[in-house]
Amino acid sequence: MSTIAPMLMKQQVGAFKAETTTGTEESLSASNGTTALFDLDISQDTEFNQRNGQNSLDKLAGIVGAQVAKVKVTTELVGSGTGATGPSWEGLILAAGCTVANGSASTTYTPVTGSSSMTTLTFGHYVDGRKRGARGVSLNMTMKGESGKQVMVEWEGSGGWIATTNVANITPASGPNRTSASASGLISSPAW
């Protein structure tokens, strides 16, 4: 996990957007940063390939191999507040291999296997004028909840690394301030 100074942690912004073409980076804007993302971490996992020398005991200069981005983030399980409207984190559950069906009063997510049209995401993590990113990210999810407390969803996945760049932090408008679901009220929440 990356180390971020405490004051900068308060000013960090995370954003994600569904990709039109799998693995192709999408441009992120303030509207993509309205979901409350907790403990966001995008780290680089780069492989380095050593090469044996020829006609010598010396090795040739090594080369950089695959550059993978590991993404970890936590969100609250909250609804949109409007029936048949997906929550702001809907892109995350679609990237976890689910499909969506909007009914007249509810939204239903169904896991699928073997889908050739699964959603992938572009992630951006803005901290102090620097942006780390990942593209082509697919996710795994774990829900955790205790009675009377909000349900948290931990998302973890990987994709292609996007080189760190110097950019201004995006300043998203606040997303909808919905009441979090508690583990005891999970079944009766109609806006999911």
Image: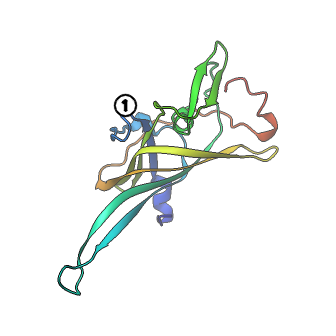
Q: Give the percent coordinates (x, y) of residue 129.
A: 33, 55
Q: Give the percent coordinates (x, y) of residue 156.
A: 55, 50
Q: Say which amino acid is labelled 1.
A: Thr
- Whether 21 is drawn above or below 4: the answer is above
Residue furthest to the left = 55
Please state if 131 lies on the left or on the right of 52 as rendered.
right
Residue at x-position 76% and y-position 45%: 149
Residue at x-position 81% and y-position 43%: 148
Residue furthest to the top = 104
The quadrant where residue 64 appears: bottom left
Split into 4 quadrants, where in the image is the C terminus? top right
Residue at x-position 28% and y-position 55%: 166
**Any part of residue 86 in sight:** no
Residue at x-position 75% and y-position 46%: 145
The quadrant where residue 136 appears: top left
- Would you call the spot at circle 1 few (<14 residues within 10 Å), some (14-19), or many (20 or more)? few
Please state if 59 lies on the left or on the right of 43 as rendered.
left
Q: Nearer the viewer, residue 161 or 58?
A: 58
Q: Give the percent coordinates (x, y) of residue 54.
A: 19, 79
Q: Give the percent coordinates (x, y) of residue 72.
A: 53, 53
Q: Which residue is mark 1?
A: 20
- Whether 62 is drawn above or below 12: the answer is below
Q: Nearer the viewer, residue 11 or 98?
A: 98
Q: How is the image coloured?
A: rainbow
